[in-house]
Image: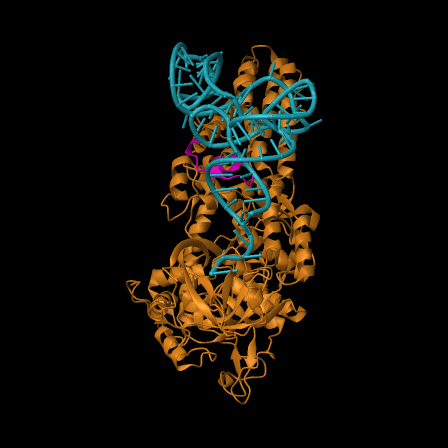
Chain colours: A orange, B cyan
RNA sequence: GGGCCGUUAGCUCAGUUGGCAGAGCACUUGCAUGACGCGCAAGGGGUCGGGGGUUCAAAUCCCUCACGGCCCACCA
């Protein structure tokens, strides 16, 4: 046995033991074990283009404590790690890092080299394959940084099980799941009004919306009545959409407007006849109580347009500017002249100009009334979302299907939520769905839709007759791969084919993490041993995206939940109790914190936080954790110094002293309590009880037993003490191991 | 507009079938004793956010209000 160190220290433990664990394959998954002896964890793949912050460490440490507990209970823990590297965040990072932008019309240049110095104002265009190469190169570097961090904080993942959401298995899984959805009718393409980000020029999903309070103004102007009666005045924050107006709408019970229902009015400036209609959603107390329906100003317009069966008068281009030619409904010379003043302008500029036109025409009543109101934004965008009509891919999620929605609500009830109140967020999200899940993105770095379209002799794409690849050929990239039965030179030609140009949104892939990690497409044996999984740990802010979408995919494919339990961690707040965010500049880098306090101390802080509870970044807690780890070293040094031949085996000596028996009885109760807590995913409670016992053990028991342990009360007393100390130390180390793995291992 | 979480000592937080208000940090005082001074011992400090109710008994259960944070919503 090695000699006890004179002065035990925490320094260097992370490096030593993470290296040793890797060498010993301590956390390798034993894939020979049957399903009921496996505990499988659907680890969140961190967005690796995002910055590292303490919030990343916080949740993953809590999950690791659960993983270590299950392993110590005898389970084979299936604990993979993924990297979410596909999608828009990576594209942005690559554009800024290398100073390039993707131009899909360019051909691949094998000798392409990004500019030596990135100039954000002058980004060099490059082909899609070149762009993807740069994305892959950068993500590999990002992943190294993350892996190093995770190893340092002691995550007990099996590092042979890593995956990337842009990797081959993830692509194959995404494409296969999509093709199966398509075959079942759970996926479909439709030409429909779509939430559109004009900056990134891509469609976005309902789950990626957020409201932001914006300054706006009510503009009041009137529509002439066809019957010559008094003008009908509306108030709008989007006067520039007047040329897209298709109707006016008021509440069916609104006596002011009821006589007008069914009649038509004429729009100012443009002279277009529009009907006055009734609909429940019109709010009598908003503005003048009668609203202008435009295609499309907001999501309410979409509802009215659909339910009142109105025509489309599109004025917005995908780049956020008003299109060059007016809608066909504007026929008058004056109307077309007015539109020409707006054509080509951004919505913002068009708004300024149309107000001038309305003023010149004497149509604007009074001054615009400034208001602040919530406006929908893409959560990563900086300009308001617009709504354009475009062909997109959707997955049915219950947003327009009562039975499916009920089924998904039922899945939410079947899932065990930790803590339970998080279920509420799922419920309110599913109940509020207002459409199916839009999964196509007009971007470059992502999983392509695995299909092609025949081109007829007239040169038109036959969207309703797509050419599908066989599952065995996945993954495919329809922009470079040629569909069965065609040759490469037929691409884009009449009688030939065209690949679907879109990619899947990153959630369409990450919603399949259970299928990706467990080998659904290529490892049936592993799949049978690990799926459905046991635990989905994640943050509460992505219940509506990741958790719900994963449940949708599993429900469709397997008619069951992808996991039995979900644990939701809380937010990290800075010491002033504000949410940590980059823009506030209060983000602390994990590396600096780990340098200062050590991994076990940081883990102690994270594991002290109750499940699902928002938690302050508290350096004090880390100091407490560090002291605890040192105390554990010192107490162990004492115990081991009384055991010169090493720890005793059960039965080596009789435990006779009442003090020893009482201490061990207390310890047994702590073990039972910690086990119960852990089985309920309450790592924090397990730690709290363990810690409370340990300090009393040190301060009371060790002081009382010391003399006897040194032999001052005879051999029998010493033997009992030594046996009790050996047993207690071993047990205490086991209790602390999920939280303080480095110091526990060191002892 | 609907909903969720929180409000306990100066600070960070426990308090799980209602039963004498707790821990750590900070503060005060003492202690170099053979695991540890990153330690040990002792001490001061709280109208449990406000109000009402149920009960022999409420931090805990019910109602209500306030404040903080978050989620959802059809936001002309």
Vertical comparison of A203 with A209: above or below = below
Q: Left or right: where does residue A458 sit relative to residue A50? A: right
* Percent x, y of residue A244: 46, 72
* Percent x, y of residue A362: 36, 69
The quarter of the picture where residue A281 lies is bottom right
The quarter of the picture where residue A522 lies is bottom right
User: Is A110 in the magenta?
Assistant: no
* Percent x, y of residue A179: 62, 69
Q: Nearer the viewer, residue A36 or A576?
A: A576
> Is residue A198 visible from the viewing direction of this image?
no
Q: Nearer the viewer, residue A507 or A695?
A: A507
Vertical comparison of A616 with A581: above or below = above
User: Is A617 in the magenta?
Assistant: yes
* Span of residues in magenta: A605-620
Q: How many marks?
A: 0
Q: Left or right: where does residue A159 sit relative to residue A667? A: left
Q: Left or right: where does residue A411 sit relative to residue B24? A: right
* Percent x, y of residue A618: 43, 35
Q: What residue do we see at 40% from left, 39% from top?
A: A593
Outermost bottom residue: A457
Vertical comparison of A224 with B48: above or below = below
Q: What residue do we see at 44% from left, 81% from top?
A: A331
> Is residue A715 visible from the viewing direction of this image?
yes
Q: Nearer the viewer, residue A218 or A262?
A: A262
Vertical comparison of B74 with A153: above or below = below
The quarter of the picture where residue A102 lies is bottom left
């Amino acid at each position: 046995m090695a000699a006890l160190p004179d002065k035990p220290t925490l320094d260097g433990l992370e490096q030593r033991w993470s290296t040793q664990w890797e060498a010993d394959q301590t956390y390798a998954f034993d894939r020979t074990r049957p399903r009921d002896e496996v505990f499988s964890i659907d680890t969140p793949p961190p967005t690796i283009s995002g910055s590292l912050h303490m919030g990343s460490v916080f949740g993953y440490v809590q999950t690791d404590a659960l993983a270590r507990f299950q392993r110590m209970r005898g389970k084979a823990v299936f604990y993979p790690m993924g990297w979410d590297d596909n999608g828009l965040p990576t594209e942005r990072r690559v554009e800024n890092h290398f100073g390039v932008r993707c131009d899909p019309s360019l051909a691949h240049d094998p000798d392409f080299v990004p500019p030596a110095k990135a100039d954000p104002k002058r980004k060099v265009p490059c082909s899609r394959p070149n762009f993807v190469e740069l994305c892959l190169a950068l993500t590999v570097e990002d992943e190294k940084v993350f892996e190093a961090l995770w190893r340092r904080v002691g995550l007990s993942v099996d590092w042979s099980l890593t995956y990337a959401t842009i990797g081959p298995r993830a692509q194959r899984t995404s494409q296969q799941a999509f093709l199966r959805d398509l075959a079942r009718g759970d996926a479909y393409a439709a030409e429909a009004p779509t939430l559109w980000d004009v900056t990134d020029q891509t469609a976005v999903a309902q789950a990626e919306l957020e409201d932001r309070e914006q300054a706006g103004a009510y503009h009041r102007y009137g529509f002439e009545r066809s019957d010559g009666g008094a003008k009908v005045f509306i108030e709008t924050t989007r006067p520039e959409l007047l040329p897209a107006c298709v109707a006016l709408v008021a509440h069916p019970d609104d006596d002011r407007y009821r006589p007008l229902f069914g009649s038509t009015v004429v729009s100012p400036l443009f002279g277009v006849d529009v009907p006055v209609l009734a609909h429940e959603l019109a709010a009598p107390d908003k503005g003048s109580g009668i609203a202008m329906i435009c295609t499309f100003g907001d999501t309410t317009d979409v509802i009215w347009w659909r339910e009142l069966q109105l025509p489309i008068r599109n004025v917005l281009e995908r780049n956020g500017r008003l299109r060059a030619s007016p809608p066909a409904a504007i026929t008058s010379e004056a109307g077309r002249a007015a539109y020409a003043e707006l054509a080509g302008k951004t919505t913002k500029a068009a708004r300024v100009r149309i107000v001038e036109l309305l003023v010149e025409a004497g149509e604007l009543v009074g001054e615009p009334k400034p208001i602040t109101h919530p406006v929908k934004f893409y959560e990563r965008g900086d300009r308001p979302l617009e709504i354009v009509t475009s062909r997109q891919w959707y997955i049915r999620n219950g947003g327009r299907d009562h039975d499916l929605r009920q089924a998904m609500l039922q899945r939410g009830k079947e899932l065990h939520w930790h803590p339970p109140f998080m279920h509420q967020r799922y419920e309110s999200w599913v109940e509020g769905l207002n459409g199916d899940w839009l999964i196509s993105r007009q971007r470059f770095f992502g999983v392509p839709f695995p299909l092609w379209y025949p081109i007829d002799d007239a040169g038109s794409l036959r969207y309703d007759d797509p050419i599908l690849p066989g599952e065995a050929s996945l993954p495919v990239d329809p922009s470079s791969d040629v569909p069965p039965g065609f040759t490469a030179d037929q691409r884009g030609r009449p009688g030939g084919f065209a690949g679907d140009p879109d990619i899947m949104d990153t959630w369409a892939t990450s919603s399949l993490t259970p299928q990706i990690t467990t080998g659904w497409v290529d490892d049936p044996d592993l799949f049978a041993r690990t799926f459905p999984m046991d635990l989905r740990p994640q943050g509460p802010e992505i219940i509506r995206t990741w958790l719900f979408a994963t449940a949708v995919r599993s429900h469709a494919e397997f008619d069951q939940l992808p996991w039995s339990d979900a644990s939701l961690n809380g937010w990290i707040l800075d010491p002033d109790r504000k949410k940590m965010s980059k823009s506030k500049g209060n983000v602390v880098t994990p590396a600096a914190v780990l340098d200062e306090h050590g991994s076990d101390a940081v883990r102690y802080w994270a594991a002290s936080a109750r499940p699902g509870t928002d938690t302050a970044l508290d350096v004090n807690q880390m100091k407490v954790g560090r002291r605890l780890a040192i105390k554990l070293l010192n107490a162990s040094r004492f115990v081991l110094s009384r055991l010169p031949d090493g720890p005793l085996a059960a039965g080596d000596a009789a435990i006779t002293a009442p003090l020893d028996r009482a201490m061990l009885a207390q310890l047994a109760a702590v073990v039972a309590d910690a086990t119960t807590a852990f089985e309920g995913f309450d790592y924090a409670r397990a730690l709290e009880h363990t810690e409370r016992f340990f300090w009393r053990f040190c301060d009371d028991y060790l002081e009382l037993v010391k003399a006897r342990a040194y032999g001052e009360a005879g051999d029998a007393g010493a033997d009992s003490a030594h046996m009790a100390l050996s047993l207690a130390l071993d047990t205490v180390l086991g209790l602390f191991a999920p939280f303080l793995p480095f110091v526990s291992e060191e002892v």
